[in-house]
Amino acid sequence: MKTRIAILGASGYAGGELIRLVDDHPDLEVTFLGAHTKAGAKLSEVHPHLTGGDRDLQPNNPDAVNADLAFLALPHGASADPAMRLLGNGVKVVDLGSDFRMDSPARYEAAYGSPHSFPEELGKWPYGIPELFGDQLVGADRVAAPGCYPTSALLATAPLQRAGLIGDGTVIVDSMSGASGAGRAAKENLTFGAIDEGVSAYGVLTHRHRPEIEQGLGAVGDVEPTVIFTPHLVPMQRGIMSTCYVPLADGTDAGTIGEVYESAYAKTPFVTVVDQLPITRWIVGTNRALVKPHFDQRTNTAVVVSVIDNLLKGAAGQAVQCANLMLGLEETAGLPMAGWMP
Amino acid sequence: MKTRIAILGASGYAGGELIRLVDDHPDLEVTFLGAHTKAGAKLSEVHPHLTGGDRDLQPNNPDAVNADLAFLALPHGASADPAMRLLGNGVKVVDLGSDFRMDSPARYEAAYGSPHSFPEELGKWPYGIPELFGDQLVGADRVAAPGCYPTSALLATAPLQRAGLIGDGTVIVDSMSGASGAGRAAKENLTFGAIDEGVSAYGVLTHRHRPEIEQGLGAVGDVEPTVIFTPHLVPMQRGIMSTCYVPLADGTDAGTIGEVYESAYAKTPFVTVVDQLPITRWIVGTNRALVKPHFDQRTNTAVVVSVIDNLLKGAAGQAVQCANLMLGLEETAGLPMAGWMP
Amino acid sequence: MKTRIAILGASGYAGGELIRLVDDHPDLEVTFLGAHTKAGAKLSEVHPHLTGGDRDLQPNNPDAVNADLAFLALPHGASADPAMRLLGNGVKVVDLGSDFRMDSPARYEAAYGSPHSFPEELGKWPYGIPELFGDQLVGADRVAAPGCYPTSALLATAPLQRAGLIGDGTVIVDSMSGASGAGRAAKENLTFGAIDEGVSAYGVLTHRHRPEIEQGLGAVGDVEPTVIFTPHLVPMQRGIMSTCYVPLADGTDAGTIGEVYESAYAKTPFVTVVDQLPITRWIVGTNRALVKPHFDQRTNTAVVVSVIDNLLKGAAGQAVQCANLMLGLEETAGLPMAGWMP
Amino acid sequence: MKTRIAILGASGYAGGELIRLVDDHPDLEVTFLGAHTKAGAKLSEVHPHLTGGDRDLQPNNPDAVNADLAFLALPHGASADPAMRLLGNGVKVVDLGSDFRMDSPARYEAAYGSPHSFPEELGKWPYGIPELFGDQLVGADRVAAPGCYPTSALLATAPLQRAGLIGDGTVIVDSMSGASGAGRAAKENLTFGAIDEGVSAYGVLTHRHRPEIEQGLGAVGDVEPTVIFTPHLVPMQRGIMSTCYVPLADGTDAGTIGEVYESAYAKTPFVTVVDQLPITRWIVGTNRALVKPHFDQRTNTAVVVSVIDNLLKGAAGQAVQCANLMLGLEETAGLPMAGWMP
């Protein structure tokens, strides 16, 4: 019998990908689709590309959920209440939002500017990057799935941090994302006319994914590095590339870096160290991440480039990967390994 | 045991999609990958988005093929010889090229300007649109898979022709295709600089898919209509939309047209009549076609819009659909029904 | 001294182009910028790409306009009142909207479904395609600038109609437009996620530009042909290509068609008959139109392809061209002839 | 009488922009167009968007040049010989290539891996960023126009360097460029299929613009900083955004940074300090650069974002700006200040 899955926030881009993945999953089946403004619609009205278009979108009511595990793909701040209700009802939760990612009330308030409504929960939610925190995910009943940018940044830099190779100075994460990362709302700055044929930076020095990256690096090493993070919006639908500049501890060399990355990702089915500079297209449509480290002897800096699909390894795919571990399934079950080109 | 599949011309876009589909197919497995200029390369060098990247590309040598069925994704004129060799060696063949589509030597010469090297074969190759010619495909050992534009045009117009509803006058097929339809070669008119942000018409009145559309319509009705076909190149990777203008027989009305389309596609898993004007994005990534007919009372004309993914229902997907029928498998086996958005 | 120009509806795409053109014009100067929801903003907030960004947007109040000529770039139905006020105040008017394009109350009601508030005006506004109706524009005080699609369709087909070469049957106009044709509003179907990488048809058999095309053809010939018009939205910012299928009078041949087009556009600075199939990129950024006729002997049909920039020759550029004629200036004054590539 | 201008390398993207700008320039006129493989073609065959399409492309022969000033838009290494011939013939030269940018033979060899054929020339060619080195450009007979990335990077960072505010550590320049920066050649990695919908990094730690940036910074301050430069290719035609991370001297604060930038660009017509994060679209089509500095107190780092049009301020536009100064013309003559949107 398949595990019953609820998806709250089913009408957004991540929600659509969750439906697609669960529909294709050998061990999971969708039993509840929740939405906010789109409640009452047929699935075909919000995701005409999916099968089973005559399924109904229900209101996002946690008490109506008939499922063993729920994915929450809700706006910031909207997950906390339904998550706690679902857990209280015995439903496992993977929250794709940011409500439970911070590991302490203080860090949450610093990042989001207001107190958390369930402060005692912070620190109890494993952070859902299986390649870094897989032990905490196996059998868990609640998981905070990471942001798309932190996933790309942490997969690129965590191996150095875990090996104690990050030196003094600032870790710089410079990222580019396709427009789907900005969500599906009809906003003036998200029209085709505004985005096509141009690039922009946003949230410079203020983006909320910066503390998340710092916390993530802190969790895999002794000293939490300071990070500058700059996201850029580029005119494509999907994909994130992060170019990370990491000051190295004295005496680091190219050979060491190569070994650290090779060993970090020797057994991870979705994360691969590559010899050539990767293009986002190579992994769009998959749950994979590609990582390419470089060593700059002139400045004793590592320049590490990583690519993911922001909606899959950066959101819905990784959430399903976490659910697989939570439920005791094969980590790779139901997750695409081959992408699409062109 | 899985049926062994060879793919000749594996390095192109259609070849890549064939590999991806066969790799995911429950009953098929790739046992031979052939290429021309890319022979000797690893698969990862030509299709970095696929799995099994360490597979080798062999020369396109039909006598080296160890397979039960071969897909030929070769340039025009390059299929005839290897196809006949493969058939002689007991290998079934699906030719994605145009070599065996015409049903007579005369029609071939008119369309392609030179005599065919195996004229006696013309007329023996079922034309691979399962929704129109499925009976001829079941158990066949050779199939000529149709062109991408003819697939979209014939799915849009054949129901009217089959019902005898096409009147005097000219059937006009006006199509738009994504750039992958022009292939993968590095040509000046296919650079990003040449294609992005512009549209062009090409092959006006001379495109070789016009006779193919006429022949296809002729095959499902009594009188072969005359067709004007205009393809346009639009700045996107995938997708074809055909807008077809069909003069109607006297007395045709909206109700009749609706019934004709509904009954034509009532039981076809991949072709669906839709109520709303479809967008190519809804089916890109799938083997589906969507068809939306309209009736213009002022001019007694049907305006029928259809959409397909040119590399799937227009090429690799339909080829696998044909192979499924040839091999006695489920028609839908291994073929994607849900697409990708955004 | 320069002629003083007002632009009402300055915050939209056509409004922005009007400002750019008038700012660069040797004989015109902007003295009034009006807007609706953006009234009160600085120009730099709505058009950051323009110079003079500290200019203020005023409310669209015709009585506050201090100008000799006003361009109205307002939504359908919003032009009639301010236009009449402006004319009453002695201000010449070029209306880029559809309010005064129809030549009779009956045609207006048929096209727009409601009676006109100034029915006696209909028929008094010259239709602003200088290449077809230039005589009526010289010295006029009011001009109805045509829609973008009708401009492309009429420039492609009017020479045949004027020469009496259109035969029985239906003229089919199949057009593709960049997304700027849909305006600047933040709508769900205009987001980057909705438009990028896909094409769609819309307004099939119902688009309001169809009667405008029919009327325009009727005005240059004896018999008004019946038209089917299908617009398509393609993923690019600018440009329209119309592919027009025109049934020909008996006995028409390729030579006659060539002569008709050559003589129609022998002296038009902005419209050129070309030998090669044009690409929209060739004229994007200019006020030019390129026209390429073909003759299909098999069906006695002309297939004529035309390209324009929908915001220039299809809107702001043609409006300035009209104003030049109204004001006794050089027809080409201030209008770009060279485009941009890539 | 207008100054006579030759353009060698007229068939590329920068060459096309040079033609367009010179054609529109009040004081310059094109008298010679040179090309390599396209010699013998009409201008309309290589740049169908330009006016005067019946002009002939001559071979790139410097001795045939009848002009007062020549722009060289040639591949790396191809400028040195013709430049010296032209100078010998009394023709002023603006080299858009990299042949004369380095200020010493040693630096040239380090950057390009081979000795220079005219080593004594290195150091004699002013580096053509008027905002930084304008004094050297006025009246010069030879100018090395800078690379597109160095222009964007130096306009973003030079004010800090000139004010002595760059501290110890590495300056990181992370840039994104539209595809026109890669030139017009028909290469496999420049097809629409390869570029659309994906991003890539290239030349990581090895790109030849890195030494050019270092030299440029060295020239405006006391100590030459060490730079890491990473270019990225994004799917758009034009535009560069550089996000620069600059370690600051102790005690620098936000106010100081603001003043330094304001005073640096208080009188530069083409370079503007902006309050909002700029989008490349705002300046595409112009010779402008927009610069937006930020101060990060946590890390004592300046994060400076700049945008230019790579073909204008990054190539042809800046070259004309230099020529204006060389010829004693108004710096802004013939250069576009208003861009295009959408």
Image (spheres, coloured by chain):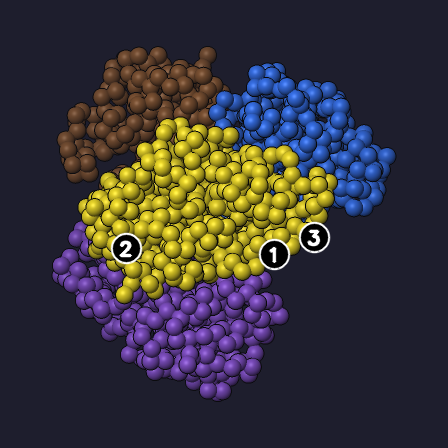
Chain colours: A purple, B yellow, C blue, D brown
Q: What secondary structure is marked by label 2?
A: loop
Q: Is residue C213 left or right of residue A124?
A: right
Whole-percent x, y for residue B145 in the image: 40, 46
Q: What secondary structure is marked by label 1?
A: helix
Q: Are marks 2 and 3 in contact (CB under 8 Å)?
A: no
Q: Residue at x 66, y 33 (%)?
A: C171
* Between marks 1 and 2 in the image, the one whose residue lies nearer the viewer: 2
Q: Are marks 1 and 2 on the same chain?
A: yes
Give the mark, 2 or 3, whose residue is nearer the N terminus.
2
Q: Is residue A235 left or right of residue B4?
A: right
Whole-percent x, y for residue C34 in the image: 69, 42
Q: Residue type at mark 3?
A: Gly
Residue under pointer 2: B68
Q: Chain of mark 1?
A: B
Assess disc 1: are there few (<14), some (14-19) or many (≥20) residues with their C-alpha within 10 Å of its C-alpha: some
Give the mark, 3 or 1, whose residue is nearer the N terminus.
3
* Between marks 2 and 3 in the image, the one whose residue lies nearer the viewer: 2
Q: Residue at x 56, y 22 (%)?
A: C272
Q: What secondary structure is marked by label 3?
A: helix
Residue under pointer 1: B262
Residue under pointer 3: B255
Q: Is residue D95 left or right of residue A8?
A: left
Q: Residue type at mark 2?
A: Asp
Q: Is residue C135 placed above or below A9 in the rendered structure?
A: above
Whole-percent x, y for residue A72 in the image: 48, 73
Q: How many marks?
A: 3
Q: Chain of mark 3?
A: B
Q: Residue at x 66, y 41 (%)?
A: B248
